[in-house]
């Protein structure tokens, strides 16, 4: 067998051979835009592998990859895998102490970075005396220049070593919103299985073009956008960051067929009403939405504005995308993430540890599930059982077999004996005509023990107040679940992956409650 066929780094090899002169990536992080063909990208991935090998890095070594959204991230990510090196895509929004932990925990031997993507990154990396330090411009003193290093590599196809069974392809770290981040060990075999099955059952066409506005270091951007497009010979437009007007303009200018994002991104784009009226999206077919509160009203508004279907998505770093739309074309109910994907086993487990067919913690089993957590045997024992991943997510299933995400086990709390999932209250809040986004957290309550409180963002010119929003929730939802305090703010706290930073939101609520008491 050709060793390239079992190496995730070569997942795009056949499309490069078939469509060498066709555009693969359009990088909008610089002016003029940088266009990279499938053939050029394939060659540059080989140069990355050869360069790292020439610098002394070998199969099994770990490589820190810290960059904002730019095409080099993609070629380094997959090019290092061609040499059997394990890239660690860093969340560049993390603090210096957390980055230090990741470098130590992963056992990094080298780093390829963009110095300007994090103010403390260079100092943190240099403090660990790694064997290999490479940077794109501006290059710090004593570091290797990335482009110069590639130019010195042998201009010939790289010869990879065979990939062993369960060999680790890359090592992402979770965001760490509930403590220190956890390294997730993902294999070449499992990730290639995910790409091939997605193409088998939901084929991507070479004529498609996606727009990536979320961070490339987040697995969702790779799984949903980059890998399927490059595998099929299609293309991707890369935005350096999300800005609503820029994203709308790019969707129109580059005639994209699909994109993805969190609900807050879509709410901000919908607020650009004049620009939306001006622009046309002739090829736009599908908009993916996930990772946070959605709500039927938002879904309907997005479909009307873009004249494209919206797909609610569910995925996780440790287990890929186990839920998808039915193969028979049956419509997915609003609020559902779909049905189990082919070749994926799922089940729900109740608090008693027994399987429950209607409600419980979601477990998943497939080749895409992690083999374990890096240096965390305690987590392996807690979250992995005979190949089953305990996701920590609560789902319910309806009578037609569709699954609905209810929230995290850790998020659920009891209010006067009534169990509350924050997502249900958040979904209620975003139905309010003035509310753009919301996050709900439990706060101490003298009578109930714990009770909901919320941060919300509202439309420009809104006259809504805490009392009027509270009245809305009492009118349209369960009385026990209505937020006892509601704070209107300019923007919700967002983590590096684009999700709401819930611990920070809770701290903000507590501080604002203290301030309001002091003001009284």
Image (tube, grey):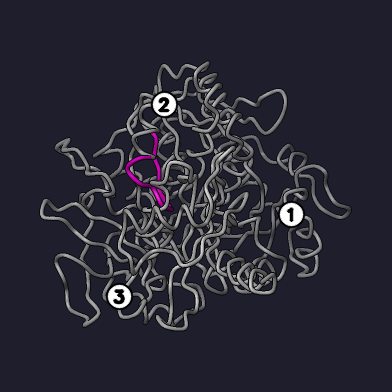
Seen in the image, is 491 located left or right of residue 290?
right
SS assignment at label 3: strand
Q: Which residue is mark 2?
A: 305
First along the sequence among labels 1 and 2? 1
Q: Which residue is mark 1?
A: 118
Q: Please name which of the two marks, 3 or 1, marks the residue nearer to the observer.
A: 3
Q: Image quadrant of residue 334? A: top left
For marks 2 and 3, give the CA distance.
38 Å
SS assignment at label 2: helix
Residue at 30% from the left image edge and 75% from the top image edge = 418
Residue with the most extreme right position? 141
- x, y (%) of residue 458? 54, 45
Report the front residue among 398 and 491.
491
Residue at 27% from the left image edge and 46% from the top image edge = 324
For marks 1 and 2, give the CA distance.
36 Å
Range shown magenta = 287-297
**Image disc number at residue 358:** none
- Rate crowding at label 3 as few (under 14), some (14 to 19) or many (20 or more) other CA atoms within 10 Å: few
Q: Which residue is mark 3?
A: 418
- Rate crowding at label 1 as few (under 14), some (14 to 19) or many (20 or more) other CA atoms within 10 Å: some
Q: Quadrant of the C terminus?
A: bottom right
């Amino acid at each position: 067998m050709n060793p390239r066929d079992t190496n995730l780094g070569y997942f795009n090899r056949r499309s490069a051979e078939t469509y060498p002169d066709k555009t693969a990536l359009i990088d909008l992080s610089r002016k003029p835009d940088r266009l990279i063909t499938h053939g050029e990208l394939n060659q540059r991935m080989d140069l990355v592998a050869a360069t790292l090998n020439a610098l002394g890095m070998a199969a099994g070594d770990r490589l820190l990859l810290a960059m904002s959204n730019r095409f080099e991230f993609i070629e380094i990510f997959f090019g290092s895998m061609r040499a059997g090196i394990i890239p660690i895509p860093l969340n560049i929004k993390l603090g210096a102490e957390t980055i230090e932990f990741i470098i130590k925990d992963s056992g990094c031997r080298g780093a390829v970075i963009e110095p300007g993507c994090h103010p403390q990154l260079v100092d943190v990396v240099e403090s660990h005396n790694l064997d290999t330090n490479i940077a794109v411009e501006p290059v710090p003193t004593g570091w290797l220049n990335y482009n110069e290093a590639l130019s010195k590599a042998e201009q010939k196809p790289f010869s990879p070593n065979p990939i062993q069974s369960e060999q680790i392809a890359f090592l992402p770290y979770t965001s760490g919103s509930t403590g220190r981040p956890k390294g997730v060990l993902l294999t070449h075999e499992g990730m290639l299985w995910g790409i091939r099955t997605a193409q088998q059952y939901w084929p991507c066409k070479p004529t498609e073009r996606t727009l990536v506005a979320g961070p490339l270091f987040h697995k969702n951007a790779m799984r949903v956008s980059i890998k399927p497009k490059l595998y099929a010979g299609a293309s991707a437009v890369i935005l350096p960051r999300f800005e609503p007007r820029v994203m709308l303009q790019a969707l129109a200018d580059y005639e994209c067929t699909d994109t993805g994002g969190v609900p807050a991104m879509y709410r901000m784009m919908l607020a650009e009403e004049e620009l939306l009226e001006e622009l046309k999206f002739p090829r736009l077919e599908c908009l993916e939405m996930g990772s946070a509160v959605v709500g039927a009203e938002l879904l309907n508004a997005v479909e009307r504005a873009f004249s494209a279907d919206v797909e609610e998505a569910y995925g996780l770093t440790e287990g890929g995308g186990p839920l998808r739309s039915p193969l028979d074309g049956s419509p997915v109910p609003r609020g559902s993430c779909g049905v189990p994907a082919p070749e994926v086993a799922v089940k729900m487990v109740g608090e008693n540890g027994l399987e429950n067919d209607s409600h419980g913690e979601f477990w998943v089993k497939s080749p895409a599930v992690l083999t374990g957590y890096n240096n965390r045997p305690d987590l392996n024992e807690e979250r992995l059982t005979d190949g089953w991943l305990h996701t920590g997510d609560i789902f319910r299933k309806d009578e037609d077999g569709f699954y609905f995400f209810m929230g995290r086990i850790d998020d659920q709390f009891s209010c006067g004996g009534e169990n509350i999932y924050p997502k249900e209250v958040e979904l209620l809040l975003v139905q309010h005509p003035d509310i753009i986004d919301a996050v709900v957290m439990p706060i101490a309550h003298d009578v109930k023990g714990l009770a909901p409180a919320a941060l919300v963002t509202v439309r420009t010119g809104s006259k809504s107040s805490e009392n009027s929003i509270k009245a809305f929730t009492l009118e349209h939802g369960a009385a026990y679940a209505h937020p006892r305090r509601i704070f209107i703010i300019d923007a919700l706290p967002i983590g590096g992956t684009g999700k709401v930073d819930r611990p920070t939101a809770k701290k903000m609520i507590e501080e604002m409650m203290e301030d309001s008491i002091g003001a009284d």
